[in-house]
Image: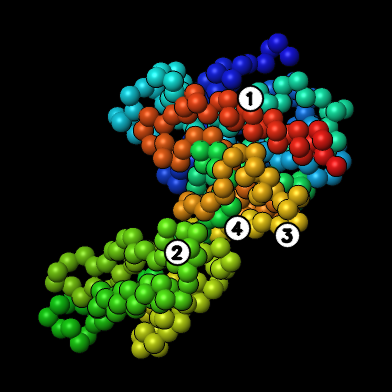
Amino acid sequence: MSQLPNFTQSLTQLIACSSISSTQPSWDQGNIEVIQLLATWFEQLGFNINIQKVPGTTNKFNFLAKLGSGEGGLLLAGHSDTVPFDESRWQSDPMNVIDKDDKFYGLGTCDMKGFFAFILQACKGLSAKKLKKPLYILATADEETTMAGARFFAQSQAVKPDVAIIGEPTNLVPVVMHKGHMSHRISVQGQSGHSSKPNLGVNAIEIMYQVIGVLIDLKEKFNLNYKNEAFDVPAPTLNMGAIKGGDNANRICGHCDLDIDLRSLPGMSDDELLHWLSEALKPLAEKYPARISFEELHPSSPSFEQKKCSTDDECFVSIAEEISGHKCCAVNYATEAPFIQELGCQTIVLGPGSIDQAHQPNEFLAHSEIEKTDKLLIEMIQRYCLDAK
Ligand SMILES: [Zn+2]
């Protein structure tokens, strides 16, 4: 046990193992170093370790550790990757943890490799024999891009804990709801030609102009038809994020692409949102046959909601509120929670640090989080593993 690092040492080692996920191949890295580090530590604590390559990725792995036996129990989950960084805006080396002004600075300190350093401390001294129900630790791959690790883990249905905590930075406030996220490209195929003879071509920009008009009306329909007051923005949203078309002022534009982002409310399926979109665009699709098409830009992330249970004493949301001392809330960012929930466990997002520091230069984890997080994890392990009924 003496070889196990203390909190600062484990945090420093985790951050030093770069594990960046990016859709840009020049940035994208594997995560095996982080996984091996976790395996070394948790193996020493008596956990059974299972490392699985995530299909469809290059050198990315999920890590699952289990202590104790039987059904149910607690799953502590997080992602092992980070976003890329802008070195010129960092005041220190992002891979080297700096302890300054009561904060630990480093890439992934709060989002969210630091969570594993907390788990390690909470697990020291645990004995499998004393656990009435198992404790699982899950570290996933590729959360920051495709969520491939969590998708694969949900499909494999390897475990079925009673409850799961995803330790994303929520300031230790239980998060029980977030919106889903989809990105699509709408393409208009026109017919190029010389600008002097407009009748011989079909101008894709002019058709896209009409598509945009439909989308603006659709945003209003979302506002009129949906309302979930748990969110700052209570309706599903549609954002027109990028447009590209044509090449020259004297050519009829032959092709135009518009990339949009759609965010669904909990309880809405991707299909429901896409149905609104296709219905709205139907008249234009009929007016311009075979000229308007859709393409999904990357796999969608579902919305998430963990409802309170009817029987209060078994309700994880109520227990998390009690242990954390905060009322549950909804957030605007997407997480792996909907995938973890597919395991059949009550799931919440609850972790140290603030999302305001995530994906930012000079990301940090404040010292003030340490005591509160230690206490929270120990109480959760006590309740769902050591004292479990
Ligand atoms: Zn995160």
Q: Position of residue 21 (x, y in %)?
A: 49, 40
- Residue 234 circle label: 2
Q: Position of residue 295 (x, y in %)?
A: 46, 67
Q: Nearer the viewer, mark 3 or mark 2?
A: 3
Q: Amino acid at mark 3?
A: Ser
**Residue beneath disc 4:** 305
Counting residues from the start of the chain, the first of labels 1 and 4 encountered is 1
Q: Position of residue 79 (x, y in %)?
A: 58, 39
Q: Amino acid at mark 2?
A: Pro
Instruction: Please tell me which residue lies in front, 226 or 187.
Output: 226
Q: Amino acid at mark 4?
A: Glu
> Tag 4: Cα neighbours inside 10 Å, few (<14), some, or many (≥20)?
many
In the picture, the quarter occupied by the C terminus is top right
Residue at image coords 55%, 18%: 8
**Residue beneath disc 3:** 310
Counting residues from the start of the chain, the first of labels 4 and 2 encountered is 2
Q: Nearer the viewer, mark 1 or mark 3?
A: 3
